[in-house]
């Protein structure tokens, strides 16, 4: 059975962001069909709702071709929302969103988080200080509905319209952090600084959605200037480690995951689990 990959990395969707996002190499993209990669300009927002809608359509198309869809990537929020469904929050009010953006323009993320903490401490604790979009969205929901975002129920029941195998891979934390440091070094050797400078020359600014991701936001100083590479390298490594820790916690909240420990080689039992799933999928009529 052929496999097609659906990207669930929140930055791989952006064109021109290649080195800082560690996109799959060209040879792999040519060998295996990939979806939701290079579909947006870095100036365009892309929400979890966009991901869920597009993934649902693509999953159906892949199954119609007789292939197996594999949704993979580092954004646990995307994966959990696709698997369990999104909270029934009010639809976006463009006018209110614009007002909130103007109100908080030039203010720090910490200031936004402090304001959110006064009306929705649960969401303020859940959302990282660096996630400006979700902090403002939580304030937006509160102002629009009069209810904190955390009061909207989130389903803990997996969708039942597909047979789904959930696999999670874990590494010992010290080893994970060592690999993160190596990845950051490799990104700089591959030309990350040149990539960022080309983007800035093209008009990229910190406020653009694609520039808020780890690997890009660290380059911008308070006045919009580009920081020194050595300082940026340290910030990227630190922020990636913090993100990995938060994502590990978030992934652990997804029900029904079969976890495997990575220690260099393919973990025992992983191939067997995949083979069983592929065999039953090939014989299934659903």
Image (tube, rainbow, N blue to C red):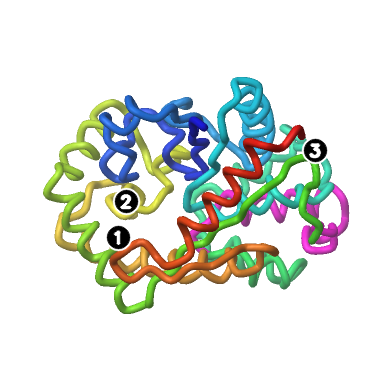
Q: Give the vertical position of 38 relative to 99 (above or below).
A: above
Query: What is the CA distance from the residue labelled 3 to the residue labelled 1?
Result: 34 Å
Q: Camera-side residue: 219 or 278? A: 278
Label 3 near label 2: C-beta < 8 Å? no
Give neighbour class at mark 3: few <14, some 14-19, many 20+ (Cα, 10 Å): few
Q: Which residue is mark 1?
A: 236
Q: Is residue 98 visible?
A: no
Q: Which residue is mark 2?
A: 215
Tell me which residue sits at (15%, 61%) in the image.
230
Task: Pick the quarter of the image with the C terminus.
Answer: top right
Q: Which residue is mark 3?
A: 91
Mark 2 or mark 3, earlier in chain: 3
Q: Camera-side residue: 268 or 224? A: 268
Tell me which residue sits at (33%, 71%) in the image.
263
Please, which residue is most extreme toward the left here? 189
Label 2 near label 1: C-beta < 8 Å? yes
On residue 247, the disc is none
Whether residue 47 appears in magenta in the rendering, the answer is: no
Tag 2's secondary structure? loop
Q: Position of residue 182 (x, y in %)?
A: 20, 62
Per the rendered image, the range of residues in magenta is: 129-155
Whether residue 142 appears in magenta in the rendering, the answer is: yes
Mark 1 or mark 2, earlier in chain: 2
Label 1 near label 3: C-beta < 8 Å? no
Q: Position of residue 109 (x, y in %)?
A: 52, 60
Is 35 placed left or right of 282 in the picture?
Answer: left
Tell me which residue sits at (64%, 72%) in the image.
125
Tell me which residue sits at (54%, 65%) in the image.
128
Query: What is the CA distance from the residue labelled 2 to the residue labelled 3?
Result: 31 Å
């Amino acid at each position: 059975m052929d496999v097609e990959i659906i990207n669930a990395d929140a930055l791989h969707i952006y064109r021109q962001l290649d080195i800082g996002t560690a996109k799959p190499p060209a040879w792999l993209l040519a060998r295996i069909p990939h979806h939701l990669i290079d579909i947006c300009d870095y100036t365009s927002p892309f929400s979890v709702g966009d991901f869920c809608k597009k993934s649902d359509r693509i999953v159906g198309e892949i199954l119609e071709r007789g292939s197996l869809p594999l949704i993979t990537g580092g954004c646990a929020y995307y994966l959990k929302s696709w698997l369990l469904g999104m909270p029934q929050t009010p639809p976006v009010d463009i006018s209110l969103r614009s007002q909130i953006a103007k109100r908080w323009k030039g203010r720090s993320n910490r200031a936004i988080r402090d304001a959110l903490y006064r009306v929705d401490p649960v969401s303020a604790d859940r959302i990282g200080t660096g996630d400006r979009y979700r902090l403002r969205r939580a304030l937006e929901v509160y102002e629009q509905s009069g209810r904190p975002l955390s009061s909207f129920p989130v389903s803990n029941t997996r969708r039942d319209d597909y047979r789904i195998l959930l696999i999670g891979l874990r590494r010992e934390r010290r080893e994970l952090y060592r690999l993160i440091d190596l990845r950051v070094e490799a990104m700089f050797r591959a030309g990350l600084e040149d990539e960022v400078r080309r983007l800035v020359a093209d008009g990229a600014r910190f406020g653009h959605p694609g520039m808020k991701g780890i690997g890009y936001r660290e380059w911008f100083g308070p006045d919009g200037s580009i920081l020194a590479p050595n300082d940026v390298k340290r910030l990227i490594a630190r922020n990636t480690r913090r993100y990995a820790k938060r994502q590990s916690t978030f992934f652990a909240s997804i029900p029904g995951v079969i976890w495997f420990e990575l220690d260099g080689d393919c973990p025992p039992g992983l191939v067997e689990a995949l083979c069983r799933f592929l065999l039953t999928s090939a014989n299934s009529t659903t």
